[in-house]
Image (tube, coloured by chain):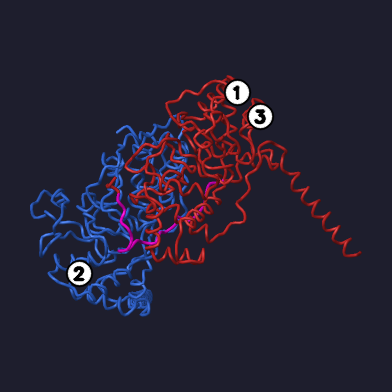
Chain colours: A blue, B red
């Protein structure tokens, strides 16, 4: 009986503590970004090298970081990416920042998670233009990589599964906490200006938050691009229908995260909107049937810029060298 | 009189201390790499950003680091580089590591120093394909850059002179001390294996050291590629004659540094030698009229690998974002 009493007391104390912590976070449809947790640091370090290693491409020139540049908001800041042989990509490169929070990967959600995503561009003839067999052959030829894979995964036979697992683990570190907006969410009233607060109120009152919510301010649902008014674009992408084959999913795209949106220009799946002001104007019109005044637009843009958090901070990785057994890059053999 | 005596005593003490320090370094034709000194750290930090900023290129995709990749020995590890529109470059990208030790920059020495060099690729239509006016317009449109240039150089009007000065100052940090060979030079007998020591002896006895000497193990003279036997190549580069217009300078190239040569493959100005073994074989034959045995070749290669020093170690820079006033990249408008 005494034991039970203690247990109940403990439970109540714990609950009270939790309430105290939770109480500090405002009850809003947008939640703070939390620092990455429960990471396998050995996989992270290996994954970082792989993320920066252009030898995963046929040319030896394109790495994950080429199009998801961690110096530039995890994007390439051009409408659609440059692939092998300077091919023009079909769609805007989404940011890798906070991508672990997405319900699925790619604009059409065709990859379930970061691990599945990571294998795609390596073998895409329009992107890195290699293939998984060749990529493994390259890595397996490099003793320092073989040693590191063995340390991390326990086998000296490298697999694509391990490669994508390590890259995904590194990508999980790429969360961006501590934006001014998050500081405000967590109780620091001075973290936002009045203009930013007014922008957030408009963002909620106008309905933007219906799709852009949660910790990533998006990334957790598919929505139709042009729900009120059709979106005009030359881009042939049709969104989620490519995955589900259901006609109802035509023009359904994963809602992009608005975290660090100041850094991830240009906007939309076709990269057609160059500025946040333009993006807000178009979204208001085609998704909500709203015309924001110039002042309202500026307020929302101001709020959006408060979503820029701590950017990735790490030592540039040094890659182990190739040797006479490493398959040679073929930059000009396409 | 007493003052003078003290001054003399001090001078003698200092001299003795210097002798003690110098005595520890072996008297060899190769000198240890010294850590970078007398740097302007504010310029270094700004220059690091510029070095990684692809907005100095027309496409918004190519930065200094694209071809002088600091994760890969300061090179791109392909025979000749990929430029704007996937153009094939005319010559192998030399490493930026320890390039501050070169007597001049580029294979033909057409730039006097790193500052002069840095302006070249930005405006080269086959490389970054921008121009200095456009590059400045881009930087000047970005308030965070304007602020940083003002802090560093004292003016809010950015000039190409400041841009190349900052990049050069960053590049001066890219020295690679503490290679096993340097530790040996400085008295640690165990820093080299017997094979590496034998390789170094051969390197000296065979005459390689006639050109590859000093702290950079090269970089301090122009020499004819093919002094004993003509070098066979499809590469049209003719070397220093392009600068001096003197016929005697045909096929005279700046001797490349052998520092970190394990990382800077493929070799020669045409990037035709894929491995160190191949490079040693060819150099022996066409420069020295020597045929190394397999064992000798392996010993020299082993010595060359002992020249890999501390690689650059720094935080990946975060770049300030563009805005509506920033000229847009034109990746597909070539």
> Can marks 1 and 2 be said to lie on one chain?
no
Q: Quadrant of the C terminus of chain A?
A: top left
Q: Which residues are magenta?
A: B310-330
Callout 1 crowding tier (Cα within 10 Å): few <14, some 14–19, many ≥20: some
The chain to which mark 3 is attached is B
Secondary structure predominantly adopted by residues drawn in magenta: loop
Q: Are marks 1 and 2 in contact (CB under 8 Å)?
A: no
The chain to which mark 1 is attached is B
Tell which residue pokes out farthest to the right in this image.
B1
In this orientation, which residue lies closer to the viewer: A4 or A154? Answer: A154
- Residue at disc 1, secondary structure: helix
Q: Position of residue B298 (x, y in %)?
A: 56, 26
Using residue B299 as the reference point, say whether residue A183 is left or right of it: left
- Residue at disc 3, secondary structure: helix
> What mark, if any, has residue B204 been given in the picture?
3
Which picture quadrant has residue A153?
top left
Mark 1–mark 3 Cα distance, whole angstroms, equals 12 Å
Q: Which residue is mark 2?
A: A208
Q: Is residue B324 magenta?
A: yes
In this orientation, which residue lies closer to the viewer: B114 or A108? Answer: B114
Q: Position of residue A11 (x, y in %)?
A: 35, 74
The chain to which mark 2 is attached is A
In this orientation, which residue lies closer to the viewer: A4 or B322? Answer: B322
Q: Indicate whether B189 appears above or below A296.
A: above
> Can marks 2 and 3 be said to lie on one chain?
no
Q: Which residue is mark 1?
A: B288
Callout 2 crowding tier (Cα within 10 Å): few <14, some 14–19, many ≥20: some
Q: Is residue A147 magenta?
A: no
């Amino acid at each position: 009986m005494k034991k039970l009493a203690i247990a109940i007391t403990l439970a109540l104390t714990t609950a009270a503590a939790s309430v105290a912590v939770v109480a500090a976070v405002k009850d809003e449809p947008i939640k703070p970004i939390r620092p990455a947790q429960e990471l396998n640091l050995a996989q992270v370090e290996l994954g970082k090298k792989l993320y920066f290693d252009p030898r995963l491409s046929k040319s030896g020139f394109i790495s994950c970081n080429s199009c998801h540049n961690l110096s530039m908001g995890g994007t390439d800041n051009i409408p659609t990416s440059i692939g092998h042989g300077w091919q023009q990509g079909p769609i805007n490169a989404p940011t890798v920042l906070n991508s672990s929070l997405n319900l699925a990967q790619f604009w059409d959600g065709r990859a379930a998670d970061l691990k599945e995503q990571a294998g795609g561009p390596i073998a895409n003839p329009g992107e890195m233009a290699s293939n998984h067999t060749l990529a493994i052959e390259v890595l397996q030829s490099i003793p320092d990589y073989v040693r590191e894979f063995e340390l991390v995964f326990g086998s000296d036979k490298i697999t694509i599964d391990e490669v994508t697992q390590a890259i995904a683990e590194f990508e999980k570190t790429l969360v961006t906490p501590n934006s001014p907006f998050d500081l405000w969410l967590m109780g620091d009233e001075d973290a936002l200006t009045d203009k930013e607060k007014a922008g957030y109120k408009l963002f909620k009152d106008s309905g933007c938050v219906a799709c852009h919510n949660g910790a990533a301010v998006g990334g957790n649902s598919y929505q139709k691009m042009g729900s009120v008014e059709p979106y005009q674009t030359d881009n042939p992408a049709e969104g989620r229908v490519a995955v589900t084959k259901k006609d109802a999913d035509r023009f359904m795209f994963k809602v992009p995260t608005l975290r660090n949106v100041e850094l991830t220009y240009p906007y939309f799946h076709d990269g057609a909107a160059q500025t946040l002001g333009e993006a807000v104007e178009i979204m208001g019109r085609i998704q909500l049937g709203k015309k924001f005044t110039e002042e309202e637009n500026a307020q929302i843009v101001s709020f959006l810029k408060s979503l820029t958090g701590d950017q990735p901070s790490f030592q540039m990785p040094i890659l182990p060298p190739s040797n006479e057994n490493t398959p040679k890059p073929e930059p000009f053999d396409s």
